[in-house]
Structures are given as structure tokens and as C-alpha cells.
Image (spheres, helix red, strand yellow):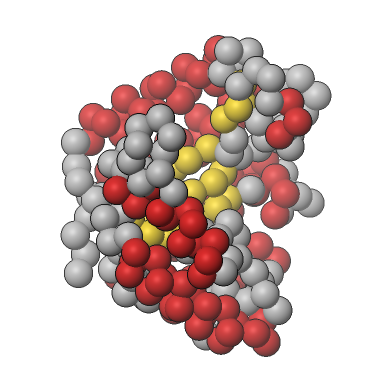
């Protein structure tokens, strides 16, 4: 994203509320890009871009939290961590180094076990998910010293088998809740991909959840929200 585009977004005035986005309290956070990637040999350039853009965003808007939007892959600078990447996959990102940029307020990961470790069974995929959450929660707290948000996770339903996705969400939410509880805010929560409404079929990518059509999934989301709220804990202060 260019400086001009960032400036236009951050200073745009909502035509209904008449509040500029940079001043709008309803916005929780910005992310620099969705799932930034590059060739591993260009990792330093990507890191420089993160630093430059994060500094620029904060120069315009220092009221909102800022994230990178990363998937969580480890890179060449943490070879001991690459074992946690699915199939040792690298995309030019450095989870630890990139998130140490001071203008970045929290770390993020994404998780799509059925796509990333597709040649395995559900038991192995859930074990991968648990390890993925655990190592990133640990590194976020001990090394980066910033809270973690699972920014995207989901499962494509098979045919019209909603129970297939629901069972995954129940187990994933259980991991998220337990890590949030045990880390005392180190893991701040998880965002399912993706909620849509009727009439948004053109945005469907297989992961879409239409709450009016999937009452069982709606109940799972409501129950998780209640569990997380019951913790009544702020984001961890790790500095």
C-alpha cells in the first residue's frame, strides 16, 4: 500500500457519523496488509516496508492499535522455529522480527489446517492448530512482549455438512479460550473467517458463514463470546 492510499483511508470522514476514521472510537485496529508475503530472499525489504508504513500510519493516527496482518510463518532468522511452519513453508516473513517493530501493537497469526496440512487427517490437523497457537502465544509473550490475536481461522464445509465445520470451530475455540485464560491476556482472542450476510454470495470463498442460515454456528459464536467475556481480563501488559 502506498502513502497516499493510507492517508486517504485514515483521514476519510464517515458520511453518516461525520467522524474521520482516524478519530472513530468504533474502530479497534488497522492492519498494514492482509497476509503480506515475498520471496524469502527479499525478507529484509519486507521488514523495511513494515517499519516504514507502520511509522507513517502512527504519524497520522496514534489513537488506534496497529497490526501487520501476518499469517505467522517463521523465517530464516529463527531456524529453530521453522519446524512449526506447515511443511517448513516460508513466505519471506519473520514472525518475531517483524512484530518487534515498536509501532506494531499486537501480533497476529492465521490458521487454515485443512488447507495447510491437507494430506493429513483431522486429528493431525487439530494437533497442528494447537501447536501453532501455543508457540505463537509463547513467543508473543516472552520475546515480542505483545498480545496475540488469531486474526483468521476457518474450515471449508464439505458439501452442505455444517457439522463438519462446527466441530472444528468448537475445538478451535476451546484452544483459544484455554490459552487466553492461562496466558492472562497474552492470547487476546480469535476471529473466524468469514462472516457474511444473505445477498453477499459473490464474496463466498467456501469459508463463509451466514448466521441466519447456520443457527448452530451462531450458537457456537455466542457461547465463545460469553466465555471470553467471562475472563474479564485486559490485554496482557508484557513490556
Question: In which quadrant is the N terminus drawn?
Answer: bottom right
Which of 178/13 is in front?
A: 13
x and y percentages locating residue 139 in the rendered image: 38, 68
- Quadrant of res 87: bottom right
Which of 216/174 is in front?
A: 216
Determine whether 72 is above or below 45 in the image. Answer: above
The residue at the point 80 percent across, 24 percent down is: 159
The residue at the point 70 percent across, 79 percent down is: 39
Residue 21 seen from this side: yes
- Asked if residue 51 lies left or right of residue 62, the reply is right
x and y percentages locating residue 230 in the rendered image: 23, 30
- Quadrant of res 74: bottom right
The residue at the point 48 percent across, 40 percent down is: 191
- Asked if residue 70 lies left or right of residue 22, the reply is right
Determine whether 87 is above or below 169 in the image. Answer: below
Residue 75 seen from this side: no
The residue at the point 47 percent across, 17 percent down is: 219
- Asked if residue 157 lies left or right of residue 104, the reply is right
Total numbered circles: 0
x and y percentages locating residue 149 in the rendered image: 41, 51
x and y percentages locating residue 44 in the rendered image: 56, 86
Question: In which quadrant is the C terminus drawn?
Answer: bottom left
- Quadrant of res 75: bottom right
Amino acid at each position: 500500500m502506498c502513502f497516499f492510499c493510507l492517508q486517504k483511508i485514515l483521514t476519510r470522514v464517515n458520511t453518516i457519523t461525520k467522524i474521520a476514521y482516524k478519530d472513530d472510537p468504533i474502530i479497534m485496529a488497522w492492519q498494514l496488509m492482509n497476509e503480506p508475503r515475498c520471496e524469502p530472499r527479499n525478507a529484509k525489504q519486507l521488514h523495511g516496508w513494515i517499519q516504514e508504513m507502520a511509522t507513517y500510519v502512527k504519524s497520522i493516527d496514534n489513537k488506534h492499535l496497529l497490526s501487520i496482518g501476518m499469517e505467522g510463518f517463521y523465517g530464516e532468522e529463527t531456524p529453530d522455529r521453522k519446524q512449526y511452519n506447515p511443511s517448513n513453508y516460508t513466505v519471506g516473513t519473520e514472525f518475531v522480527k517483524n512484530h518487534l517493530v515498536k509501532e506494531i501493537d499486537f501480533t497476529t497469526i492465521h490458521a487454515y489446517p485443512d488447507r495447510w496440512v491437507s494430506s493429513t487427517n483431522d486429528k493431525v490437523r487439530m494437533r497442528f492448530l494447537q501447536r501453532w497457537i501455543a508457540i505463537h502465544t509463547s513467543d508473543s509473550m516472552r520475546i515480542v512482549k505483545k498480545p496475540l490475536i488469531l486474526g483468521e481461522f476457518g474450515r471449508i464445509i464439505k458439501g452442505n455438512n455444517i457439522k463438519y465445520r462446527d466441530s472444528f470451530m468448537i475445538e478451535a475455540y476451546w484452544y483459544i479460550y484455554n490459552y487466553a485464560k492461562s496466558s492472562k491476556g497474552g492470547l487476546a482472542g480469535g476471529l473466524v473467517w468469514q462472516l457474511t450476510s444473505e445477498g453477499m454470495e459473490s464474496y463466498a470463498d467456501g469459508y463463509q458463514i451466514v448466521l441466519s442460515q447456520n443457527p448452530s454456528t451462531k450458537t457456537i459464536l455466542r457461547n465463545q463470546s460469553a466465555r471470553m467475556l467471562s475472563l474479564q481480563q485486559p490485554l496482557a501488559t508484557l513490556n
